[in-house]
Amino acid sequence: MISSLLRFLKPLSSLRLTIVCLACCMVLLFVGTLDQVHVGIFEAQNRYFKSFLLFFTIPGTGFKVPWFPGGYTLGIVLLANLIAAHAIRFRFSWRKVGIIVLHSGIILLLVGQLVTSVFQVESQMRLDQGQTSNFSESPYFDELAIIDESGKDFDQVTSIPTSDLHRGADLKLPGSDVAVHVNDFYQNAFLINPGQLPSPNYPHLKLGPMAVAVAAEPTYKQNERNQPATSVTISANGQSVGNWSLSAAFPTPIRFQVEGRNYQLVLRPKRYYKPFSVTLEQFRHDRYAGTDIANNFSSKVRLVDPSGHENREALIFMNHPLRYSGLTFYQAGFDNNDTTTILQVVKNPSWLTPYISCALIVLGLVIQFGMHLTNFIRRRVIA
Amino acid sequence: MVPFDAFSGTQAALSGPNYGDALRKSRVFASDRSFRVKLFVPGALVLLALLGCRQAQVEVYQIPKEQLALEDAGLQLQKPQELPQWTVPESWKQESVSEMRIASFAIPNAGGKAGDVSVTAFPGDAGGLEANVNRWRGQLKLPTLSADELAKTWEQTTVDGIPAVFVDLTDNQTDPNGQRVLGAVLRTADRTWFVKLTGTNTLLAAEKARFQDFVRSFRFGDSGDQNAPPTGGKSRSTNDK
């Protein structure tokens, strides 16, 4: 068993493999950075760096052929390569302590990046002047939320990611008799007036007397987001409750009742609720005197956490985020003639690992080169 | 020097110049290596399990009723959309609102189809003034016009200090039963308000003054902004130049 594992690990610990992987990383970084111009940062990250393989679609066939390893594959192979090398080759000696510390830093960096890529959640909190909010919304993902309002003090939210919505999908709400059948789903849609349809039979979802949704090509532009639309049938115990068409561009909840319980149905940006609230007291967009060039963006907010008895003001500005309850609030944007602030809310359980890794790498280098230097000086003194 | 094995915690007290070679041959490291190799497999499985966590899944959670959550925090939820005050002409009949309409009125038309008044509001510039007026033109099968051409067809004014535009569109001026649209677009700081009257040429000719009085009666209170920009735009990143 061990000997067969060793046979497997030996080629994995090869230095050639390290060099090939690093070269592939450089190619991946180059191609991904170039393609970012076309598909935006988010899609480029998903396609090139948060994927196992890159695919090429044969024109006219829709057939996808893998052509290059993605970031996950390269990262995992590099990590395995490093660990395998340690498992097989390295053994401890004080003379190599620097290299071991340095490699530990690199391993921590790779593992930390993997944990970040899996567990990091980015969202945005949009606040008008004086507005209070206790949730942030995803700038990329949407959800079909079914909210049971019948509770006295609490609403129960069932959030279905749009990745689960496709034509013909049947979804049963956990712990409930309510089921959702997806009649149609558009990943991105335009809202137009019914009179603007090319023909009455053109595929569309009727949202109301004044608006219909028609399918559009998904967008990857930096300053745009996809606005999905869907048509669903809600049923309870096999009995249809109703058919509704919804659009994320117009996230007005639809209300319905099932066995005396009140529900809301809404297609909206995915929400992340917080156990505390944030109020925008003042947003500032300062400019250099006599010009339109910005020299400062800042948001003065009040953070109130009833459970933690927290009630304080905080000023968020460039390189000075607000950190609270495992979340970091950065100043990200503004809107509405400088009356609305947009805060980037980042939850990253391994945000400290890059700092620790870099410290370990620097420490390892200092130890290793320091020892070489000491030996060198000692030899010169002896000579 | 005393080599120390970090994995097994075993110390091999060896001395002499060839202690490195001695270590390589030592059985202590052979068994230790197998231990490290065994560690490799569960490590790889943990990595794969981690990657499996990325899949978005159905989530069920409870939230305090939104109003309650904020009252608990000693704060009050700002009203999502404050409605302006207005004066409705006596002859107009209030209708139930639909999901997009803030207000809806019917204008009785003896012997003909009733006129339909709608008030709607959308965040920001709602796609732009020109696009919306061209959308109305499209409903009457009128050709799309450029921004410069459109500017010649509308009347710019202010209502309660808010920039406003009146449009008057018809598909056939000579036909008394031709379709006509009277519209007004008002731009407050954070949203665009659309007031639209649809009906026949004859009815709207009689109602035009009342429609304009209705729009001019809009009072926005705090929801308006004297310094509102004439046109809005998308939200901007602080990285934008």
Image (cartoon, coloured by chain):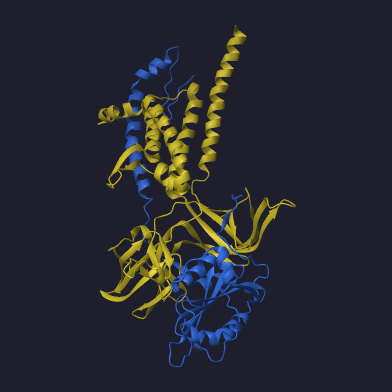
Q: Colour of chain B?
A: blue
Q: Which residue is at the front of the view, B140 or A11? A: B140
Q: Would you place residue A159 above or below residue A257 in this image? A: above
Identity of the residue drawn at 54% across and 66% down: B130
| Extreme residue toward the top, this view | A383
Q: Would you place residue A317 above or below residue A241 in this image? A: above
Q: Would you place residue A69 above or below residue A60 in this image? A: above
Percent of width and height locating residue A236: 29, 74
| Extreme residue toward the bottom, this view | B110
Q: Which residue is at the front of the view, B190 or A239? A: B190
Percent of width and height locating residue A20: 38, 28
Percent of width and height locating residue B110: 46, 93
Compared across the picture, whether A22 is left or right of B221 comes to left
| Extreme residue toward the right, this view | A289
Percent of width and height locating residue B23: 39, 19
Compared across the picture, whether A14 is left or right of B128 comes to left
Which of the image's four quarters has the C terminus of chain A?
top right
Q: Which residue is at the front of the view, B153 or A238? A: B153
Q: Would you place residue B55 above or below residue A236 in this image? A: above
Residue B8 seen in the figure: no
Identity of the residue drawn at 52% across and 40% down: A354
Residue B212 seen in the figure: yes
Q: Quadrant of residue A69?
A: top left
Compared across the picture, whether A248 is left or right of A380 comes to left
Which chain is in yellow here?
A: A
Count of all numbered marks drawn on residues in the image: 0
Which of the image's four quarters has the N terminus of chain A?
top left
